[in-house]
Amino acid sequence: MRRSSLRWTIPTILVLQLGLLWIQGAQLHRQNQVLEDLREDIQGLTESIEEGRSSTSYDDEGAAAVPVRFQAHPEPKKKVAVLGIEEEQDPAAKELQASKDSAQKAVKEAREVQSKLSLEENARKVDEARKVQTATSSWQLWSWGAIALVVLALVTRSVIRRRA
């Protein structure tokens, strides 16, 4: 009776493990898809910042932002040269250039802050690792000492028994 329960238990456990691995693979695939979508959005945002245009579009009814990957990509607008419009566009062009410059400056500052945070985080991790290493080496020293003491006691015991 004991043998028949083992005969079905092991295959059942293996099938359950296989099912769990399949579920985990599906979750990893889903996470990968989400990360790829986020990567595309970030690339779109950086491209739009570099080009100096907004990465969101607003529909006529409300101000709902639409991610870049869902926007309809209209054909590029044709530029028509008209005399007198340049004077009106100069303030707008200056404002556009100023906003582009400020966006590039903000991206540069964000990258600098991120690198500083990254350096601080790495320093903290190194410090933590050093503390863990110190604690581990201290513990290992005591355990090696205890093992050496036990071996010494066994050797002494065997020498005393042989003499007795």
Image: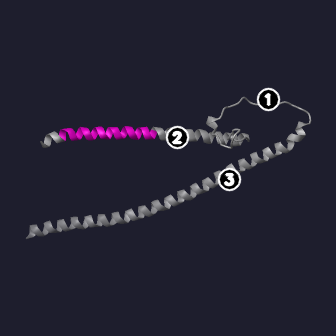
Q: Is residue 158 above or below residue 105?
A: below
Q: Amino acid at mark 3?
A: Glu
Callout 3–callout 2 Cβ contact below 8 Å: no
Q: Is residue 18 magenta?
A: yes
For image coordinates 83% across by 43% down, the residue present is 92
The numbered disc on residue 34 is 2
Callout 3–callout 1 Cβ contact below 8 Å: no
Q: Amino acid at mark 1?
A: Lys
Q: Which segment did they paint magenta?
A: 6-28
State the SS at label 3. Answer: helix
State the SS at label 2. Answer: helix
Q: Earlier in the sequence, mark 2 or mark 1?
A: 2
Q: Position of residue 98 (x, y in %)?
A: 79, 47
The numbered disc on residue 109 is 3
Q: What is the quadrant of residue 97 in the picture?
A: top right
Q: What is the quadrant of residue 58 in the picture?
A: top right
Which of the two marks, 3 or 1, is nearer to us in this view?
1
Question: Which residue is most to the left?
Answer: 164
Measured Cα–Cα span from mark 2 to mark 1: 36 Å
Q: What is the quadrant of residue 81 in the picture?
A: top right
State the SS at label 1. Answer: loop
Residue that label 1 marks:
78
Q: Quadrant of the N terminus?
A: top left
